[in-house]
Image (spheres, grey):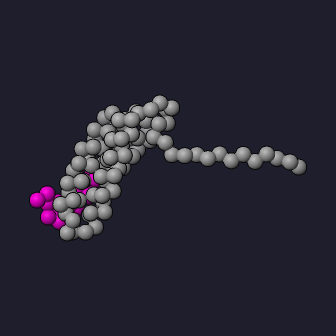
Amino acid sequence: MSQTVTTRHHHFTLNTDGRRHPMANTLTLLAGCLAVVSAVSAWYPSTHLVGSWTGGFGLLAGLWSQMVSATTAERFINVSAMIVSGVGLLFGLAHGGLY
């Protein structure tokens, strides 16, 4: 009994509609990176400056990216990045603020 085995490799892409969106993708990745930095900084009270500023910029980048996003994958990452950036901003403000 011979059967052909096909393997499909699915890779993650932000362009689920088949078209390129370089500005929207760049903003989405920027918002995601700022959110990660803000979240890591939230765990250490001595890095409240980094956490609060990257949280604020991540929130703004996520909002702007949400306005120009074209696909659901971009929107999912944008909303997640905005939530994480907001939490990082709030922890940064609670630990000492922006200055």
**Outermost residue to the top:** 19
Q: In this view, does 84 lie above or below 74?
A: below
Residue 38 relative to residue 1: left or right:
left
Which secondary structure class fits the magenta region best?
helix
Q: Is residue 97 above or below residue 74?
A: below
Identify which residue is drawn at 14% across, 60% down: 97
Identify which residue is drawn at 51% across, 32% down: 18
**Outermost residue to the left:** 99
Identify which residue is drawn at 49% across, 32% down: 17
Residue 51 relative to residue 1: left or right:
left
Residue 78 relative to residue 15: left or right:
left
Residue 23 relative to residue 4: left or right:
left
Where is residue 84, by image quadrant? bottom left
Where is residue 62, by image quadrant? top left
Identify which residue is drawn at 28% across, 67% down: 43
Q: Where is residue 38 in the image (x, y as percent from the top left)?
A: 28, 58
Q: Work out whether residue 26 can be spotted.
A: yes
Q: In this view, does 43 lie above or below 87?
A: below
Q: Where is residue 52 in the image (x, y as percent from the top left)?
A: 20, 57
Q: Position of residue 50 (x, y in %)?
A: 21, 59
Query: Is residue 70 one of those drawn in magenta?
Result: no
**Residue segment shown in magenta:** 85-99
Q: Work out whether residue 83 can be spotted.
A: no
Q: How many marks can you see?
A: 0
Task: Say which quadrant the C terminus sits in.
Answer: bottom left
Q: Where is residue 48 in the image (x, y as percent from the top left)?
A: 19, 63
